Image: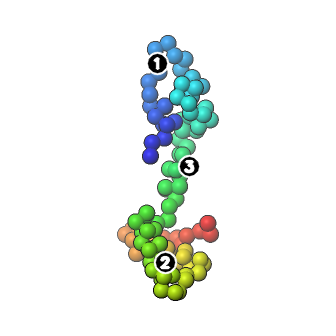
Amino acid sequence: MNDRAIVVLAECFLPGESRTYNTRSKRIGVPLSTLHRRAQGRRSKEQKAQSQQYLAPSKEKALEKYLAGISDLGNPVQIKFVPSLAFVIARQRSTTEKPINPPGKN
């Protein structure tokens, strides 16, 4: 995952080029607002989503496989029980003293 705005900020200016975000954004094709937000330290949507992910991708796949297996046996799982299953998995992986909060509504 490579954010083009961060790459633009890290690049050096070309000789004779104006030293503004506007010049850089036009040269690379990144919106000016995005470039400014990255310079201020705001993360991209992908980075934010990754940091807010409740379960690791491997654990998500394991949960998905488990739910599919139960469903294949003729016992469909109600949606309202999925967060509690995810919470059980998250509690088991926790090695820190920090308590694990249950997943939010969304």
Rendered residue at 49%/37% (across/down): 4
Name the residue type under label 3: Lys
Name the residue type under label 1: Leu
Q: Which residue position is annotated with label 1?
A: 14
Q: What is the residue that sits farthest to the top in this orientation?
A: 16
Q: Which secondary structure, mark 2?
A: helix
Give the vertical position of 51 relative to 42 (above or below).
below
Crowdedness near tag 1: few (<14), some (14–19) or many (≥20) residues, C-alpha within 10 Å: few
Q: Do the residues labelled 1 and 2 touch (CB within 8 Å)?
A: no
Circle number at residue 67? 2
Q: Which residue position is annotated with label 3?
A: 45
Q: Distance between the residues labelled 3 and 2?
A: 28 Å
Specify which label sits upstream in the sequence, 3 or 2: 3
Rendered residue at 55%/74% (across/down): 83
Give the vertical position of 84 relative to 55 (above or below).
below
Q: Which secondary structure, mark 1?
A: loop
In terms of depth relative to the viewer, which is nearer, 85 or 40?
85
Q: In this view, does 15 lie to the left or right of 44?
A: left
Give the vertical position of 91 relative to 54 (above or below).
below
Q: Which secondary structure, mark 3?
A: helix
The image shows residue 80 at horizontal and vertical percentages of 60, 78
The image shows residue 99 at horizontal and vertical percentages of 47, 71
Q: What is the residue that sits farthest to the bottom in this orientation?
A: 74
Name the residue type under label 2: Leu
Rendered residue at 50%/61% (across/down): 53
Q: How far apart are marks 3 and 1 (CA)?
A: 29 Å
Crowdedness near tag 2: few (<14), some (14–19) or many (≥20) residues, C-alpha within 10 Å: some
Circle number at residue 58? none
